[in-house]
Amino acid sequence: MPLHLPMIRSMAKKDAHHEVPVAVYQRLFEVAAGFDQAQRAMTALTGLRMFDTGEMRRFAALAAETKSAIASFLAGAIEMVETDAAGRLSRSRSIRDRREERSGG
């Protein structure tokens, strides 16, 4: 099991439905926004003669790559937890539906 899953699952246990807490989505947004801010700053700095344009473009590309890698990693972990929750909820609904059919109501 990947190392990050126990942490996300333990956060999710605080929720009665074992879903990913909103705070996890907020952190994902904050990571993306931070990289966007860094890329805008590097773009602004690229125009200054004191910085090598090629290096600044390289750093901007590295930031974009890192942002995508982190988002992919976090989204994959979130997907696993959400898929588990969806399966659990679906099974619960199926059981509830069968009980209602048997009871006639």
Image (cartoon, rainbow, N blue to C red):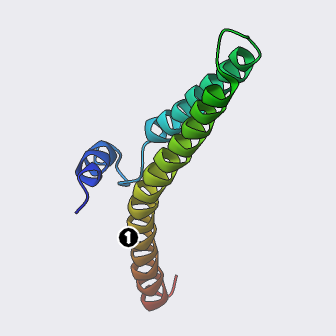
Image check: 55 left or right of 78? right
Does 86 sit above or below residue 46?
Answer: below
* Mark 1 neighbour class, 10 Å CA radius: few under 14, some 14 to 19, many 20 or more: some
Q: Position of residue 28 (x, y in %)?
A: 51, 39
Q: Position of residue 34 (x, y in %)?
A: 56, 26
The number of callouts visible is 1
Residue lying at 54% horizontally and 30% vertically, measured from the top left: 30
Q: Which element is circle 1 on?
A: helix
Residue lying at 45% horizontally and 60% vertically, measured from the top left: 82
Amino acid type indicated by mark 1 = Arg
Q: Position of residue 48 (x, y in %)?
A: 73, 11
Image check: 13 left or right of 58? left
| Residue indicated by mark 1 | 88
Q: Is residue 51 visible?
A: yes
Does 34 sit above or below residue 21?
Answer: above
- Residue 71 versus residue 28: which sits nearer the camera? 71
Image check: 11 left or right of 61? left
- Residue 42 versus residue 30: which sits nearer the camera? 42
Residue lying at 44% horizontally and 67% vertically, measured from the top left: 83
Q: Position of residue 96 (x, y in %)?
A: 43, 77
- Residue 2 versus residue 42: which sits nearer the camera? 42
